[in-house]
Amino acid sequence: MLKTVNLNYNYEDGKVALKNINIDLNKGNKIGIVGGNGAGKTTLFLSLIGYLKPDKGEVIFNDKKIKYNKKSLRNLRREVGIVFQEADKQIFYSNTYDDIAFGLRNLGYDEEIIKRKVDIIINLLNIEEFKDKPVHFLSHGEKKRVAIAGVLALDCKIIFFDEPLAGLDPSMSDNMINTMNNIVREGKKTVVSSHDMDFIYEYCDYVYVLNKGKVIDEGIPSKIFLNENTLNKANLKEPWLVKIHKKLNMPLFKNEEELYNFKRENIKG
Ligand SMILES: Nc1ncnc2c1ncn2[C@@H]1O[C@H](COP(=O)(O)OP(=O)(O)OP(=O)(O)O)[C@@H](O)[C@H]1O
């Protein structure tokens, strides 16, 4: 439903940030976009949500080229949302409720419907405790949950997460991953960029690797992370489960759970 065809983007100062990018979000429901600093991940996200207009090439949404007029972008934003790395970038209001309601108000929903939708999301994300709190008193992790709530309230079908775990403690990280898994369980799609390869390996079902504005590899995580050439070129760290597989000659497990189940069965045997 969302893809790019030969997408190129240059910043005003002449920096070539994306070169001939062809990605197709139909390849998975938990898509990872990875690459070193400056590889072009954020630029690609901003292009896919229609915020940046390509210099060459297209972003295709539901089989049609995105047009950059108000109406077309409004339609896109009903279906495609983003949770920025810095929650402050998308938080505008002084209290949590109004902030979550912001997008819905923008789309012209009745206050009664807005209240119903916002209450459902507040309950779903378990954030009742700071519903009436001024947003600037919330911690980084709490602000991030408010940002997610705002996107979920819009019922977007595709949600981009730019570095979703950055700055979160282990329990908040688990909470974030659970929320993302629940979003996918509801039939929606998540697209994540992260420098945490353990998370990308375990969470994603399809990965694109960017280097200097180009896609240098794509595929399922086991294919990507077993390819030393890709990891070296893009400056990516080997996930710990891949390391165990290679160094201890163990099977390649997708997550910790699979590893423990394997051990249990082998100890029993
Ligand atoms: N507003 C801008 N003007 C000029 N160049 C920019 C601008 N924003 C980003 N760039 C450059 O474009 C390239 C891609 O940047 P981008 O932020 O997309 O990378 P990234 O993969 O998200 O990096 P990181 O992992 O460090 O966040 C970088 O070389 C960056 O310096």
Image (spheres, rainbow, N blue to C red):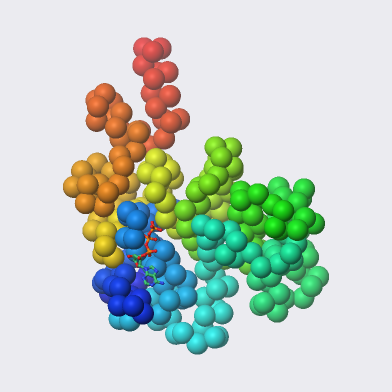
Residue situated in front as seen by the camera: 39 or 30: 39
Location of residue 129 with respect to 45 vertically, above or below: above
Residue at image position (54%, 66%) is: 81
Q: Is residue 223 visible?
A: no
75 displayed left or right of 197: right
237 displayed left or right of 195: left
Residue at image position (51%, 57%) is: 85
From the top left corner, tell me how far across and down residue 235 is, in percent.
Answer: 27, 49
**Furthest-left residue in view?**
229
From the top left corner, tell me how far across and down residue 224 is, in percent.
Answer: 27, 47
Answer with the quarter of the image where residue 44 lies.
Answer: bottom left
From the top left corner, tell me how far across and down residue 238 is, in percent.
Answer: 30, 39
Location of residue 242 with respect to 14 vertically, above or below: above
Q: In which quarter of the image is the N terminus?
A: bottom left
From the top left corner, tell me how far across and down residue 256 is, in percent.
Answer: 43, 31
Residue situated in front as seen by the camera: 256 or 147: 147
Residue situated in front as seen by the camera: 115 or 8: 8
Residue at image position (41%, 35%) is: 255
Answer with the quarter of the image where residue 4 lies.
Answer: bottom left
Q: In which quarter of the image is the C terminus?
A: top left
Residue at image position (30%, 28%) is: 244
97 displayed left or right of 48: right
Location of residue 259 with respect to 150 vertically, above or below: above
Ligand 1: image quarter = bottom left
Q: Is residue 199 visible?
A: yes
Looking at the rendered structure, the number of numbered marks drawn on it comes to 0
